[in-house]
Amino acid sequence: MRPHDPARIAKLLNPQSVAVIGASDDPSRIGGRPISYMLGQGYQGRIFPVNPNRTTVQGLTAYPSVAALPETPDIAIVIVPASAALDSVTALAERGCAAAILFTAGFAETGPEGAREQQKLVDAAHKHGMRLIGPNSLGLINPCNHFYGTFATGCELAFPKAGGVAIISQSGAYGAHLMAVSTANDIGLSAVILTGNEADLTVGDMLQMVVEDPATKVIMLYSEGIKESAGLLAGLDAARRARKPVLMMKVGRSAIGSAAAQSHTASIAGDDRVTDAVLKEFGVVRVQTTEQMLDIARLATRGIYPAHNTLGVITVSGGAGVIISDAADAVGLPMPEMPLDAQERLLKLLPFAAPRNPVDVTAQFLNEMSLISTFTDALIAEGKYTSILGFFTYTGGVASVAPRLREQLKITRSKHPDCIFALSLMASREQIREYENDGFAVFEDPSRAVVAIEAMGQFGRAFAKAPALPAPKLAPISLPTHNPSEAQAKQLLAQAGIASAPEEVCTTIEAAVTAAQKIGFPVVMKIVSPDILHKSEIGGVLLDIHHEADVREGFALLMQRGKTAAPQARLEGVLVAKQLKGGVECILGIHQDPVFGPVAMFGLGGIFVEILQDVVLHRCPFGPDVAEEMIRSIKGSPLLLGARGRPVADIKALSEMLSQLSAFAVAAGPRLQSIDLNPVLAMPQGQGAYAVDAVIEVTQG
Amino acid sequence: MRPHDPARIAKLLNPQSVAVIGASDDPSRIGGRPISYMLGQGYQGRIFPVNPNRTTVQGLTAYPSVAALPETPDIAIVIVPASAALDSVTALAERGCAAAILFTAGFAETGPEGAREQQKLVDAAHKHGMRLIGPNSLGLINPCNHFYGTFATGCELAFPKAGGVAIISQSGAYGAHLMAVSTANDIGLSAVILTGNEADLTVGDMLQMVVEDPATKVIMLYSEGIKESAGLLAGLDAARRARKPVLMMKVGRSAIGSAAAQSHTASIAGDDRVTDAVLKEFGVVRVQTTEQMLDIARLATRGIYPAHNTLGVITVSGGAGVIISDAADAVGLPMPEMPLDAQERLLKLLPFAAPRNPVDVTAQFLNEMSLISTFTDALIAEGKYTSILGFFTYTGGVASVAPRLREQLKITRSKHPDCIFALSLMASREQIREYENDGFAVFEDPSRAVVAIEAMGQFGRAFAKAPALPAPKLAPISLPTHNPSEAQAKQLLAQAGIASAPEEVCTTIEAAVTAAQKIGFPVVMKIVSPDILHKSEIGGVLLDIHHEADVREGFALLMQRGKTAAPQARLEGVLVAKQLKGGVECILGIHQDPVFGPVAMFGLGGIFVEILQDVVLHRCPFGPDVAEEMIRSIKGSPLLLGARGRPVADIKALSEMLSQLSAFAVAAGPRLQSIDLNPVLAMPQGQGAYAVDAVIEVTQG
């Protein structure tokens, strides 16, 4: 069990004192850089170099050991060789240090032996409640208080500017790159945290820390793989509640998932898709490129997150207006038309204008600069757009135009402080800073501005979202020791209220005939065996049975096929079930994710899942409202919603089944490996949803 | 008929002399800017200002009229008011001028009256073979010979640098923006052509002109709507044959297409999708953003277009390597693994390296700079990658590293001149120019580099593509005066070898019974009427008819339904057809595009077309090889290709049917409005493909 101690962890970001174990007098060496950076940038806390061979380090008093320090430092940086790391960590922990940042490499990244040594570090630290970043970490920076617990050379190019964006990265080199490009793009930072091997503190822990940090407004995460879910989920939940946007670059989208499991569900629910589902759940914007990360973070620092985001565009080029419209359509950012009376009024002011939205003032604004504020005011006041994008190309930087344009824009900006306001223009670095200081986010390319603006709405929707309905709670479900048969699986699921088609397991031909007559023709017949998981592959399913004679013949045929296909299989009989007509085939499934636990999947049957991989995933458990959102989110959902004259399916019953299944997965505990309900028939509205087949796989035990 | 005179048109780009009608002495006025720009930039041709009120203009001799000019100018710029434009154009045409650029506005863009006046300009010009750009054009620039036939103020910010990229834009403001951002991004230009109203010369004509221009290597097009196809198609074909990459921004992707037609085909084949299909046919890369346009054009000027493009990556950050891999996967750029023996060799040189591809030299390269050339050489020589991307983040710009890095990179570059070589790094403008001069294309964001590199392969494949098989040629097909019935439609299509299921039209119950017995049960029965187009909507189709009694009952039922649904409809009987089982349902269709003529569509039946809009389009006619490519390109194609144990469909028969249909569309002439073969059943391999239903719509005549 990991200690829970946010106060200790918080000292990493705001230490009053720091010991540097393995400090060097040479500012170019790894052991010298943190001290050199802190002295150069003006860190106000106390720095205690520890070096047994020197009395001073870079002008500071040096101490021979941790024990010899004049006080217990809040935190420490450990730069000693791997062989000496355990001693340092033990000494720091015993001294009562809150946390240590381990630059030292040579642990888990080198193999199992290193992993064992790494665990010793953690054990030594936790014995006294000390927490660790790393080992193999490039460090931690707080540009606001000039704490530079890092040896990143990127600092030498340009030290980061203090601001509201925190960077948390599992990759040291990429995190340092992100710091450098943020700085080059005038994005101020509140923290840069490079988590290294994550022996103790993880990305999730650091996320929780920066959410608590008042300087941090926006958080950029880079992850190559989530190792533990609890900290991340807690951090994401806290960030959403604190209205702090989280952007994440989670790489490895293209990696082929782990070995395909027996059920379709498992093979489709690749690891990366689970992460995607979790990020979506918490309103995290997942970015694909570094540029997107910077664009969105920069706009997000303005702190405006409309839940119902709409875009109004003012442009001096009709062509650019169309490009912007296309870009907005591509990302789903609505650009409603201006009210007709407002359009008429604008046309009276400028007959050549395009007043619909985009609003095109044409080159005429060069002669009549007040058109800019008049038209933009109209966009906000009458079009009620929450976001405005102005396209001014090179006129925004031309000396004869720029100051007058800026003046006009400032008038509008000051009247509407709650509006997102982005500009697309070409100008010098200095001019762009002026626009930015006036309250505008400047993008050279308007399409990038559109992507960033759309993201603000994603954050807004996540922050404004009503709490989901509670997930159903079920009493613990006792799983059998081996994989259950289809009939057993259905009985288990019935405990969670998951309905199957009327059916009966029959061990004799006569019983099958009686069952078929009771259920009513047509029926389907299926072989029942705990040893045959995919019945259709061995011809173990017969459809469209209309007559008694066919029941008799079918029974014999199925038993024979069962024996032929799997001579060792236990044949428990034949299932006779009502053949349901007129339903839409769906697939519901559960898959155990190694990080996030049971994950539910929903998709449409057949082609949709097999070829189009049109599925949606969600962590278990969840309520029927979340289930319905999932169902409506897939591309094929029109099939269920009455497209082209089809009957509307019983979405309510289907949502409840999916929600109950998610509760079942939790109640069944970790021995549950997977569930595959394929197909589930979603009948027309009011007629329910039925699992036609059910496969449950368990860990033997 | 428009004149065909490439020599005259070419004078627009390289005029030896230019008359400026409506010349102004004031260099800030529209009539003064072209002269001021040309004088300032050093245009070597003769400039003849025409202004009845002055004897000199900006120091040049001015002439009172076109007639008074001392010689016939190659071309002219017309800047007079709209009311005087026709006189100027007439005078220039009579004088023998080859072409004129009309800045004058107030024509077709103002309405039908303006359009009529505009046509008079064209008629006056064509009477003497003169060609026109505009009216309402922002002009034409050739930065190579400093001809500035423009009043774009963007020039005042920075005059374009001479280079190999031509810009052709229907939007003046956006074209000028593109010129400005190209210049700001160090992209040299060979032409900037802003086509205005396109009364005479179109984007397609200008495309043909720059393809012939030896200075132009790469072409950027911006279009808001193609007005005529012949010029564009000729230009695209010429560009491909000349190996000149064309990039196109065609806006209006999101616009809702023209009114939905009766057939599914027509409603799906929106105008923009047709353009998309045509661009794809010619290997044009369609860009979504201005940044993409610049990125790809810049890399394209290097002139390396591999037909089988593969990417090798050398990086100093593992994280960036993964980001690049994800980006390459997303755009379909292959990144094969390095050969195992090469990997082993590299690991011997640097045990921490990741040698697979991406090849990660880690921060160790800072100590051992030769790793860069050694590892990159190995990528090219042993991995055989056609494209290399190096990620060096801020180290590429740090003074202590950059010169040594540059030296190493130059060594490799000089050994492999035929390799595309891009770098992702942060550096000063000056440093980036140095890398660029060394033969590298520099991108700050590696994901943008990946997109640009992938585009080089698209060009390469288009340039290397073997000529397609000839399209089938059919004798002219005579269409009926009204929409044919299903049976008539199938007879017509049979002329093109398009097979239907065995079937017979029956006018009596007895005939239907006889036909069903001849064809063999089960059969389908359908009402036959030229007045009922969508039979299934009125219950006019009966499936699964197994017995004679059902044929009798069905006949009566269909006739009754036909009468009830459309009392005025001519009922010609009932079609009895073989019910085909085991085929895959496809849809083949034809739609008349107002610009590109008949366009063929292929998609899978049902959900795929209706809900997923998974269709592919192609101009008619085309051969079976193109048809097969179309069929294989849709997302649902695995259904036809044997996915998950399905039988492989008769792709050959299906391709031939699609190709024949395309030839039919051409042979049927412009009275053909649409064809909808829905469904076509693609039977298992060797068993053919059959149109089960056929709807042909014609213009009445």
Image (spheres, coloured by chain):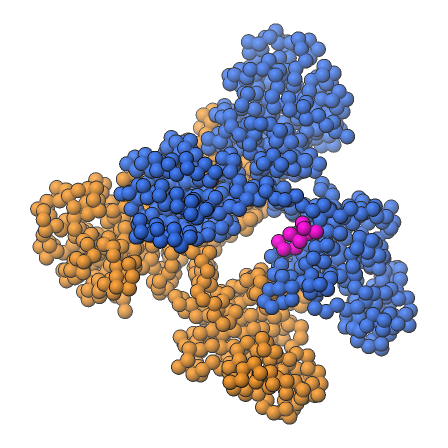
Chain colours: A blue, B orange
- Front residue of A293/A322: it is A322
- Front residue of B35/A438: it is A438
Can residue A348 be spotted in the picture? yes
- Front residue of B392/A362: it is A362
Q: Give, as a single range, the part of the protein colored magenta.
A: A624-633
Can residue B291 be spotted in the picture? no
Residue drawn at x 53%, y 24% as measured from the top left: A143
Left or right, residue A445 beside residue A477: left
Left or right, residue B122 beside residue B588: left
Where is residue B2? Give x, y as percent.
Answer: 27, 66
Residue A566 part of the magenta-drawn span: no
Q: What is the quadrant of residue B38 in the picture?
A: top left
Residue A630 part of the magenta-drawn span: yes
Where is residue A556? Give x, y as percent.
Answer: 87, 71
Residue sitting farthest toward the top: A55
- Front residue of B309/B201: it is B201
Does B82 sit above or below residue B684? above
Where is residue A339? Give x, y as percent.
Answer: 42, 52
Where is residue A273? Give x, y as percent.
Answer: 65, 47
Does A402 sit above or below residue B227? above
Residue drawn at x 72%, y 27% as measured from the top left: A4
State the quadrant of the N terminus of chain A.
top right
**What's the magenta bit mostly, secondary-structure-wise?**
helix
Left or right, residue A292 beside residue A666: left
Count of marks overlaid on the render: 0
Residue drawn at x 31%, y 41% as measured from the top left: A370
Does B296 sit above or below residue B392? below
Residue drawn at x 73%, y 46% as measured from the top left: A471
